[in-house]
Amino acid sequence: MAERPSAAQEALSKVEDQLSCLVCLEPYTNPRLLSCFHVYCQHCLDDIVAHNRQGQLECPKCRRPTPLPPIGVSGLQAAFNVHHLFDIQETLKKVKEPQKLACEKCSVTNRKATSFCRQCTKFICEKCTDMHKEWDELKDHELVSIEKVEGDLIRLVSSNKVTPRCPKHNKSLKLYCEPCGELICTHCIVQIHKDHKYCVIADTFESHKKEILDSLGPVKKQLEATNTALVNLDGRHAEIVEQGGKIATNIHSKFDEIHQALYAREGELMAELEGHTQQQLKSLSAQREEVEILQTQRNSCLHFVRESIRTGSSGDVLKMKQGVVKQVRELVDTFDPNTLEPRETTNTCFAYSTQIVEACQDSVHICTSKEVTNYCALKVVPSRRMKTTQPLPVAILNAIDSKQRIVGLDLLNIEAKLVSKLTNETTKCVVKERGKGEYEISYQPTVGGASELIVRVGGEEVAGCPFPVSVKTPIDKLGTVIKTINDLNKPCGVALNQAGEIIVAEADAGIISMCSPTGHKLRTLDTRVTAVGKCVGVDRDDNILVVDSGNYRLLKFSRRGDLIAAVGSHGDGPGQFNYLISVYVNSINGKVYVADFGSNCVHILNSDLTFSSKFGSEGSGNGQFCSPWVIASDRSDCVYVVDYSNCRVQVFTPDGGYLRQFGKTGSGNGELSFPASICVDSDDLVYVGENGNNRVSVLTCEGVFLKSFGSEGSGPGQFNKPYGIAVDQCGVVYVCDHGNNRVQIFS
């Protein structure tokens, strides 16, 4: 049985493994440190630089370049730790046979060593050991007895604390010059490092060591990241292997189906062929019987006539002549030569497509998810009002390529999610296979509004992502605050432009605030009007129309705030106003409708703000007003006018012809109390903000009550005079909470 190596032998083997250069495979000579912390012999690095055309130095192991100092490889930092390993190697060689160790300190030869001094890095005898214990300058040296060497190899070789000496002055290098980063002696201070900042090594070593260790913090994090990356790579390796197994199973399964289908078709064809062959053979058999009968008849005729002539008398033959000749002629005349031709042919064949093999080869293939996403087509379902009891389909994913090949997307891991543009809320979608390469994507939304649909197949986004998607909150769930725009000064009107910006009229400040779709203020337009009306309008070109009530005029500004036009003056004539309170732009016909509170009428202006007509008068009858307040229109171009003091909404034709009305004073369902704002959505649902009830009522265009939300107060979903209201294409409702200096956004 082989003898187990000693601890010293094992340690020596490990050290020697670290002392070979990876280039020359020999023990290091003058080792130099590269920027990647790999160590090589200086002469090996010189050869690498010499053979590089650009004279660059790249690490042979990791290929990271190291900048060369002006003097070349010799200017690179020396790998002192390797030198220390050589010292450790020599020490370990001696430790292998401790009984043969002689004292390396005293002058007496062959005196047996009994201890090892870590500071002197020498084996010493008993007398020298006593001297270490007695002399004050040696008392701090750390001694290890020879008996304990085998069990204390780490302490024996872990550090060399011999103070180095200055090569120029032969003095102890006990100082550290910080600007130069060098160890110096006291003589160096005067001659070489004058005026440099230096410190005593013993006093500051711990702080410098801490700085070095602290610098390793990012390296540790990067090491953790690489460790995590390797784990992830191993995990991805396992996933790819698993995926390959699944696809292989899928391939076998699919080809089993194809084989079964082919075998089934083969059986059908063989049965069909057997039936066809048997039918032909049966027909031939019947024909053969007919021909055999003809043959028998002719044989009988020949035999009878010949035998009658051979055996009968002349009288007998002549006597039967006429009858026999007649029968023979009849037999000959009834003979049909076609009966002798085979009625069945041998032209039956096996017909198949010459492209069957090519189609089989081209109809199946292995592809990556990136290839799949290049031909995946996604069709977004048009916006609709969602239901609360079932998932809402939002898109159909088609995964058939130009050659009508369907990919097993279940193996590629389809992921779909919706991100709300208003709240950034993410909702995971459900993907359901519909067959023939189509997949339905649906989800159960918690809020309505504009969202973005992101679909990934095998981790790759489908071309065109993100896809804009919009859904409308169910009427029974409408009324949840999803966003609030604060820091407004008495907001009295709100509108939306084609860019999705929220335009808010601030009454007391006389300004228009432009906000992003998420509610962040983008800019402010200083309209410099004496009193902003109760509503702000936006035309087809995103120009902003504002009522200047105090100056009896209507102003048009560009989206950036430049004044484009100003029309109107005080009076009762065409183009004159008494007290304008709101403006509305009909998106269908481009007409501009202005509510004149002072004249109890509505002015109709052309798109260029020239006067067209007006309708209405003071009163409570049909078509009359007591404080016409705000205006809206529906998809049929009907015009809705809020009759504030009469607590009702009247509906007119585009030219002002009276159609109908709904609402009456009260706080019940369908009753209105001083309605002050109105808008109509794309489903022709009418939203009315009521100052008296501090709520928003939702009704059909015929005035049938559906829902109301809000109450008096300053909390979320409460109002203090809802003076302005707007709704976007997704059914998101924007309400000016006048008294609370905010706009609340509902879904």
Image: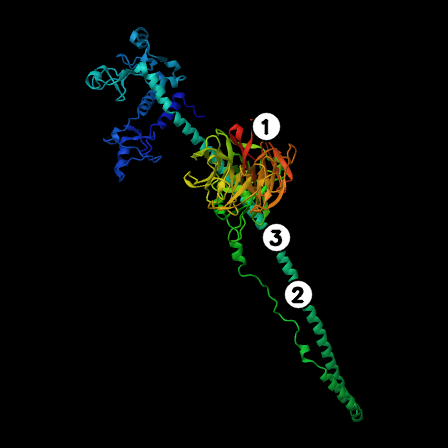
Give the mark nearest the N terminus, 2 or 1: 2
Residue that numbered label 3 is attached to: 260
Q: Secondary structure at mark 1?
A: strand
Residue 645 % position (x, y): 59, 34
Residue 122 % position (x, y): 31, 16
| Residue 151 tag number | none
Q: Label 3: few (<14), some or many (≥20) within 10 Å?
A: few
Residue type for callout 1: Glu
| Quadrant position of residue 268 | bottom right
| Quadrant position of residue 216 | top left
Residue 685 in view of the camera: no
**Relative height, residue 440 to residue 741 (above, below):** below
For the residues marked 1 and 3, what is the alpha-carbon distance in whole angstroms? 72 Å
For the residues marked 2 and 3, what is the alpha-carbon distance in whole angstroms? 24 Å
| Residue 712 tag number | 1
Residue 95 % position (x, y): 35, 19
Q: Nearer the viewer, residue 139 or 745?
A: 745
Q: Secondary structure at mark 2?
A: helix
Quarter holding the C terminus? top right
